[in-house]
Amino acid sequence: MAVGHDESTASLTEPRLHLGCQACGAMLVLEPALRTTRCPYCAAPAVVERPPRPGVPEPAFALGFALTHAAAKENVSRWLRSRSLFCRSGIRSAEPGDVHGVYVPAFLYSALAKSSFRATIGEDYQEQESYTTTENGKTVRRTRTVTRTEWRPLQGELEGYVADVLVTASNGLRNEELEALEPFDFRALARYTPALVSGWVAEEPSLTREACLKGARSEVGERVLKRLAGLMPGDSHRDLSHDTRLDWESLDVCLLPVWVLPVRYAEGEAPLRVLVNGQTGEVHGEAPISTWKVLIAVLVGLLLVLGGVLYARGGVG
Amino acid sequence: MSEAARVAPCERCECELEADDLRCPICGLSTPPPEREEATRERAKVVRCESCGAAVEYSVEAKAPRCDYCGAVTHVEMTVDPVDQAQRWLPFTVDPKAANQALAGFLGRKAFFRPSGLAQEAALESMKPLWWPAWVFKAGVQVSWTADSDAGSGRSDWAPHAGRTRLDFTNILVPASRGLKVEECNTLTPRYRFELGENEGRGPEEASVERFEATRSGARKAVLQEVERLAREHVQESGDIPGRRFRNVHVAVALSSLRTTRWALPVYVLAYRYRGKPYRVLVHGHDAELVFGESPISAWRVLGVVVAALIVLIAVLYFTGMR
């Protein structure tokens, strides 16, 4: 299930900040969605510190960038070249634009999941079956061994921890996009400190805790189902369902390293946004498909089929 | 069991935490952050280099915040995964002389396939007192299991079953040694008296320490695998699964209150040479009566047995054929 949230109530909105640069004293104007800035006069990197705000948790952790911007650009070029032939013209030969490294906020969720499950388990057995067949023009009776399945109900309980569940806390990165960039390597997790994001763009959480919690819970539900599927006995199973209670939920804001590249592939078209996991180099983007190319391919396919049929008929006739 | 400064256990699963854990390695709950002064008003802070005072930025190349002017890297609290170190040591209570005698006793033991002159001809090549590494853990485990068994079966031979059981493991040893085989470690383990544990190694001067080669996360993985293995074994052997026969046993475990201690355990590793070939024998560091290892096999005696068996076989075939 996707994170279901109403943009008007789930997003956080705040006014712009006017703060003095600690290096040169110039006035910095900060977008509320950003945690970092760079002074336009002295180029000093600054990280915003705010007093605690209700409903907006401070980042607890951050994963630092491990992939250089040159490597990110190279990964995207390779990714563009490997796109399908049916993509819009110019995508496969496009050059990625400026690369921006952004620390995107996400919620890192864990809980103790106590599930009651029900399933129908298939236990195979074999039996002899008699059938009739024609041999040398005569109808004969034969027997054969067939495998049948006996379906039996099963219910039980499963208790376990579910950790490392990530859901986006940013309006700028959809949860599907985050899932496409996963996994992140949590062995490199660091406790958040302003030095980790200094000089980089770091976003503030723009989605509420409640909206993210809903998304995290639905992801836990999927993980529990997968775990249960692996636990089922028998030769097969169906109708697996569970009722899961989540205790000891914990939610921490973690800043994730993401390279963002706009790719301009045609005049007058909005650039294609490509994302790169700043740790692993995994690339994600939604290259638009050309309707004309698909249509032509379908037509050519149909003509070939038609031609083949006509040829076959002509050949037979 | 550890004497080291204790860190409060995880609030969620009550498992033991190390001082530098950012999250509980078992359940993933974040550890409480160190006290930090809260900002009273908004400000745009410039992070300064601790060495030269210049503005610091995060560097991808250094994978840490680094000062462009002096190159100093700012310390960040990271997830660490150090190689394990022994916390508790068992002293050698068997001295080298006694170990040597134990070897002589081992070589003098009568066994049919052993060469008769082994005790006289074997030459001691080396004797190494050694502490081998092991983890000893205790934990509470909630085990959920499913299996097929013959109980309640219908048309098929099998019917599905599921259940839950709570187990408490205490003082379970998981060998971490690369030098000793698992079977050797399992033979040595029951004779150790863990109540004699000390904070430092005490034994012969030349005694060496086999280091833990696994990192902290590797240790936790090994312990978890052992918990799963033991849980599976328990479910299969305790009679929890109804019926006489079963298959497809699946277990899922949720750990709580895990405490692991890293031990260094004494053993003598002796090498002797017999007719140009080396053999290895272990003498327990606490109990010289436990001696085991490799010994040569007399090729003549094996040949004798094979020939005798062949003669018997031929004779049997001959007499049965005559009837």
Image: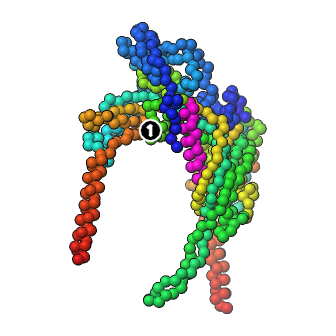
Residue sitting farthest toward the top: A25
**Measured from the top left, where is residue A218 in percent x and y?**
56, 41
Residue depicted at 60% across the width and 67% down the height: A149
Side (left or right) of A73 relative to B287: left
Q: How many marks?
A: 1
Residue depicted at 51% across the width and 33% down the height: A6
Side (left or right) of B310 relative to B167: left
Relative to the observer, which residue lies in front, B106 or B122? B106
**Measured from the top left, where is residue A221 in percent x and y?**
58, 44
Query: B227 above or below A279?
Result: below
Residue indicated by mark 1: A177
Query: A291 above or below B28?
Result: below
Q: Which residues are magenta?
A: A209-230
Location of the C terminus of chain A (image quadrant): bottom left
**Measured from the top left, where is residue A265 in percent x and y?**
28, 37
User: Of helix, strand and loop, which one carries label 1?
Assistant: helix
Relative to the observer, which residue lies in front, A102 or B277? A102
Magenta highlight on residue B207: no
**Chain letter of disc 1 in the image:** A
Amino acid under disc 1: Glu
Relative to the observer, which residue lies in front, A232 or A278? A232
Q: Is the stretch drawn in magenta largely helix, strand or loop?
A: helix
Query: B187 above or below B304?
Result: above
Residue depicted at 60% across the width and 72% down the height: A126
Magenta highlight on residue A216: yes
Relative to the observer, which residue lies in front, B141 or A237? A237
Picture quadrant where residue A130 is located? bottom right
